Image (tube, rainbow, N blue to C red):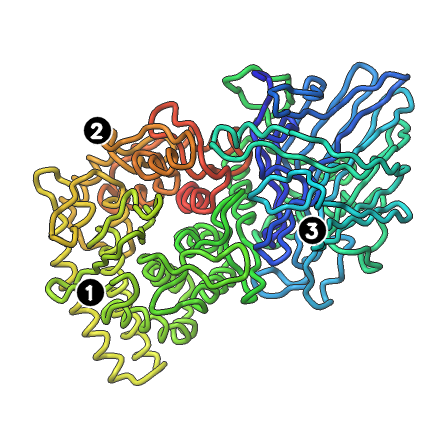
Amino acid sequence: MLDLDTREWLLTNGLGSFASGTVSDVRTRTYHGWLFAATNPPSDRTLLLSHLEASLEVLGTVVALGTNFWGNGQIEPTGYELLRCFDINPVPKWIWGQNNWQLTRQLVMPYGWVGTGGWAQKGIGNAQCPMPNAPPRFCHRTLIQYRYEGSDTAILRLRLLIAERNFHHQQTANPGLQFSQLLGEQQICLQAKNSGNFGIPWHLRWTQGRYQTDAVWYWNYGLPEETKRGLGDKEDLYSPGYLIVTLQPGDIVILEARVGFPDSMAGVLTSETFAEAVEAEQKRLSQIFGWREGGRGAGSREQGARENFPVCPPHPAPLPPFNAQCPMPNAQSTIWQQLLKASDQFIVHRASIPGPTVIAGYHWFNDWGRDTLMALPGLALVPQRFDLAKGVLRTFGHYCRYGLIPNAFPDVNGEPIYNSIDAALWWIETLGLYLEATQDWEFLAEQFPLVQQIYKAFVGGTHFNIQIDATDGLVSWDAPGVALTWMDVVIGAHPVTPRYGKPVEINALWYSALCWLSQWAERLSQLEFGEPVRLTKQAQRYAQQAQNVKTSLQKFWNPQLGYLYDTIEPDDRRNSQVRPNAVLALSLHHCAFSEHQGCQVLDLATVSLLTPYGLRSLDPGDPEYKGRYEGNQEQRDRAYHQGTVWAWLIGPYIRAWQRFYPQRSLPFDWQPLLDHFLFDACLGSISEIFDGDAPHKPRGAIAQAWSVAEVMRHIK
């Protein structure tokens, strides 16, 4: 197993659908497969096509190209031993070969929301899907291309491995689960039936080859990453049959897995379809981000639109000679373009609005209010996707209830979950950053009633006993069994880091919100977007309240430690643990703390919390510190905010440093985090978390929105 490269790749389609796997082409997670379709975007993600198990026959010799873990610990077959090269951009590409042949495989997941306007870039469709002027349609599909090179004729066999299961769960063969298949001309329609309930219809089609029905279950695939996480780690996959393709040197075969029954509007599958889909995606990205046509954003059809950013880094484990001769990424502009591309993977359409939202992370997160709003400046404001930013603010504003913004949306139809004290405050902070960037005062006038609704809910009291303390003007809360800040793990009915009372970053957000309200009321009065006299009085009231809160925030100052208390608890005790929330409080647009205090906080945070990948969530000297995020669900949950490094926290640290130490160099080396982005974990994205202890192994979600977003805010 030592030479198995289990670094991961990810493809998305803007609707919540995704495909993912590893460099060695072995599946290690429940979330690995070639078509997870979000049939209720971005939710109801269902695995349909796991993969195609390939073998190649040349001159009578058959070689298996697949690699599988099995539940008994065996690895069989060992196709990774024939893997000569892997490339990640513009799409995943594998090359297997021996002396007299070479087989290349590429995958692409085309953008799935066709015929849209506004933030989604009207007119940017994909090949073989409806024309841009047609009504919007969802299109979930994956294209696979094989190219054969060699001196002799070869026979390629591709066995379908399929499923019908929620993306969080494993499939188990049982008599009640059956799959129907209807064979047509160069295509097969598939649909599951489980205990009388029909599944999602989908179909596979191909440009050449002969399909052979051969229904069989493959039992007991092993999923070692799930074993490490203490979760279900066995899977059964169904195979309805296999495709036989005779290939001459230079031949290409294209396959498409697409949700739904065959549709005449889908067009004809040709040998150009794959290259056209890659080209359409490159064009979409270049139009969004302003890349030059024919430059880094474009590709060559002859090479399947091969691009820069090949995977050829040094690696601590022995590896096959993948791309030994390939050039390294050569410039910061290349890294910036890859960050832009990574950021776009999180932007998805929510059908229930309809409108844009942000997937918090892959593989297992949905759209989370707090994460989305904290990531939005990097994902949308920095690359000047202002329509997107406005759309997301509207999306979450639409769901505001009781003065609260949802923390999460369910994977299936249901009411959003409002267990967050800070999402509404982050909504105001992000709205302020949007307005600073755009001067879009009409949007402010549209949203100002919602701003006031949030303000009134906090002042008057709302769910979870969230209210303003009349004695000091600070935000307080107290509700058993929940955790309302970003440190939100609950085990059973017991929060790991409850932070009841007055958390420091919540009250820093409250102060910043009051400053914004004062500015906005004054601005609206000047622009005559309301009643000037009333707005002017409101502005004065908000300003006075902000000043009172600024004074009260000094309650958080711990002069003995030279740091901010993390919380003032309901009984007025102070929590003196050294956590990054103090840094977060210094990083907001409006800051209530003095230069002397800010410098002291940063000095201690630099010594205790800063790592090459972000900030620890707790000082290693604390008796509650846990340096490794591993083990079963409960063990991991207990470490989540007790020392684990969070990559997104590097952004607040940098903003605070730039505020309080504007003339001093940043004590942070970008190279380890950029090396992680380019060469580690999920290639071309940034992990959610890292171990608190060196060597800070990446953990959690392999691609996290606010991790990417905060790097984007400061790397360019």
Circle nearer the N terminus (2, 1): 1
Q: Is residue 410 above or below residue 447?
A: above
Residue type at tag 2 = Gly
- Residue at 55% across, 23% down: 313
Circle nearer the N terminus (3, 1): 3
Q: Indicate the position of residue 416 as horizontal and vertical percent values.
A: 45, 61
- Image quadrant assignment for residue 445: bottom left
| Residue hosting label 3 | 195
> Is residue 455 found left or right of 108 in the rendered image?
left
Residue type at tag 3 = Ser
Identify the residue at the far left of this view: 560
* Contact (Cβ within 8 Å) of mark 2 with mark 1: no
- Residue at 50% across, 54% down: 358
Q: Indicate the position of residue 704 as horizontal and vertical percent values.
A: 47, 43
> Is residue 697 found left or right of 307 in the rendered image?
left
| Residue hosting label 2 | 621
> Is residue 690 found left or right of 179 in the rendered image?
left
Quick one: SS at disc 1? strand
Considering depth in this image, is 76 or 299 the residue closer to the camera?
76
- Residue at 31% across, 51% down: 483
* Contact (Cβ within 8 Å) of mark 3 with mark 2: no
* Contact (Cβ within 8 Å) of mark 3 with mark 1: no
- Image quadrant assignment for residue 436: bottom left
